[in-house]
Amino acid sequence: MTTQRIGTREEWLAERIELLHAEKEHTRKSDELAQRRQQLPWVPIGKDYRFITEAGEVKLADLFQGRSQLLVYHFMFGPEYTAGCPSCSAIADGFNGIVTHLANHDVMLTAVSLAPLDQLRTFQKRMGWTFPWASSMSGEFNFDFCASFTPEQQRDGIEYNFTREPQQPWKKDEPQGGDGAEFVFATTCGVNTPTYLRQRPGMSAFIQKDGVVYHTYSTYSRGVDGLWSMYPWLDRAPLGRNEGEGVWWRHHDQYGLHSNPASPCCQHA
């Protein structure tokens, strides 16, 4: 039963105009934040990061593919996973349509994950994606950019989203168990919850100038909400994200195959 107010066209119009002023202010604030991101200092990359791609082993500079700017989506897909994170997958569903536009605006977009390239390619084919995707399993890139963590780091309390998380009591051989969103997603990925949470979502930006690669920006957790193409649409739908129903999204080829799990919304979504 709905509890939404029912009103006249005149009442709606008056409140809509008032809301318009707030929306315009929000847009101006968003523009200011974008400028602040671009004004952050550039930090030279001092390590020789290596990645495995369809072209073989490449350096970070090679991921630019001739562009001066590089955007990396830290996609949650660990070596133990049998499928990519459903939340990251929902975000990546929007990449195919924009990657060409970005590339023609001097910006390269690529996903990077810790899993071997063969696993990424298999899942990519299943999802029908064509955007670049590189494996960082041969180096420290994922760990240095807070996208992957070791079991020891996880037990001691990891540094994620520029905040230290509390220690976790999980044991090495802990079974899957649980009923929260993380358990639902972990099961979808074929791993237990601790293993699932050793990968984290985020994005990082880089620029290449005069032969030097610089790190310019990173964001994590709900910082990637703005990259989730379905959210702006849901935020304008009558019931919004309707997250009270729990975790409803899944891999796009899995809708209709299972009933929706009733569990709290994922902490990183």
Image (cartoon, helix red, strand yellow):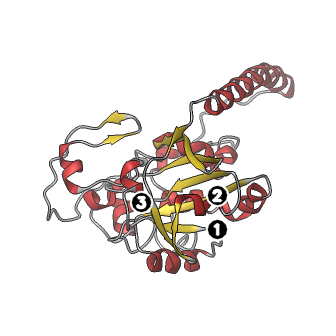
The reply, left or right, for residue 147 in relation to residue 26 is: left
> Is residue 133 at all visible to an observer of this figure?
yes
Point 28% across, 61% down: residue:
195
Instruction: Indicate the amino acid at tag 2.
Output: Leu
Label 1 to label 2, Cα distance in Å?
8 Å
Q: Position of residue 120 (x, y in %)?
A: 48, 74
Mark 3 and 2 residues: CB-CB less than 8 Å, in contact? no
What residue is shown with label 3?
Answer: 261
Viewer-closest of 71 and 169: 71
Point 64% across, 57% down: residue:
109
Label 3 to label 1, Cα distance in Å?
30 Å
What residue is shown with label 1?
Answer: 131
State which mark lies toward you, 3 or 2.
Answer: 2
Q: Which comes sooner in the sequence, label 3 or label 1?
A: 1
Q: Position of residue 57 (x, y in %)?
A: 49, 73
Which disc number belongs to residue 203? none
Tag 1 secondary structure: loop
What residue is shown with label 2?
Answer: 109
Tag 3 secondary structure: loop
Instruction: Indicate the amino acid at tag 3.
Output: Pro
